[in-house]
Amino acid sequence: RDEALLRALQQVYKQFGCEEGLGHFEVVYITAAESAEQFAACFRAMPWLTLPFTHALRREQLRHLFEVDPDDCAAVLLHMDGTTISREAKPLMALAHRLQSSIDEKRSESSYQKDLAKLIEKERKSLAQLEKRLQEGVVSRLGR
C-alpha cells in the first residue's frame, strides 16, 4: 500500500541514527492493515514503534490521541522527550528522503567529477611523457 513511503521512512530513520537510539525523534506507526498478514508483511520491514495488530482498541486510542485519519496508515513523529513533533510524519519523512536522495546524488556526481578530473590529469601526464619521448627521439635522429 505505502511500500515506497515505508522504504523512504526506513532510510530516513536509519540516516538520522534512530535505529541505534542516537536520533532526536521516534516514529510511531499506526497501521490501517485489515489483516494480521498485511500487518506482519508491513511490520517486518519497520524499525520503529507500532502496536501489535491484535491491539485494535489501543490503535484507535492512539488515532484519537494524535488526531489522525482512522482509514489510513499514520506515522507520528515524537521528540525524544515525548512531545509531538508532527502528526503527519509521512509527508515530512518523504520530503526528508527526497532531500537526502538529492544530497546523495550531488555527492555522487561530485565524486564522479573528482574521479574524472584525476583520470584526465593522469592522461595529461601520460601524454606529456609520450610527447617528451617523441621529441627526444626526433632530436636524437636529427643529431645523427
Image (spheres, grey):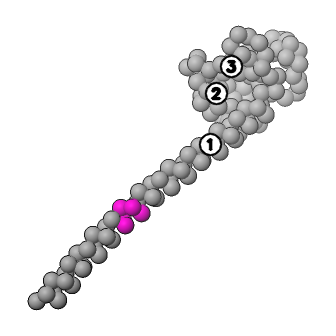
- Left/right of residue 80 with respect to residue 112 in the rendered view: right
Tell me the CA gap for discs 3 and 2: 9 Å
The kind of residue tagged 1 is Ile
In-front residue for pair 39/14: 14
The kind of residue tagged 2 is Tyr
The kind of residue tagged 3 is Phe
State whether residue 6 is above or below residue 55: below
Q: Which residue is mark 3?
A: 25
Looking at the rendering, which quadrant does residue 53 occupy? top right
Q: Position of residue 22 (x, y in %)?
A: 58, 18
Question: In the rendered structure, which disc, 3 or 2, sits on the residue that comes first in sequence?
Answer: 2
Magenta residues span 120-124
Tell me the CA gap for discs 3 and 1: 21 Å
Does residue 119 appear in the picture of this structure? yes
State whether residue 129 is above or below residue 81: below
Question: In the rendered structure, which disc, 3 or 1, sits on the residue that comes first in sequence?
Answer: 3
Q: Position of residue 72 (x, y in %)?
A: 84, 29
Image quadrant where one finds the N terminus? top right
Magenta region includes residue 123: yes
Looking at the rendering, which quadrant does residue 19 occupy? top right
Magenta region includes residue 82: no
As drawn, the label of residue 13 is 2
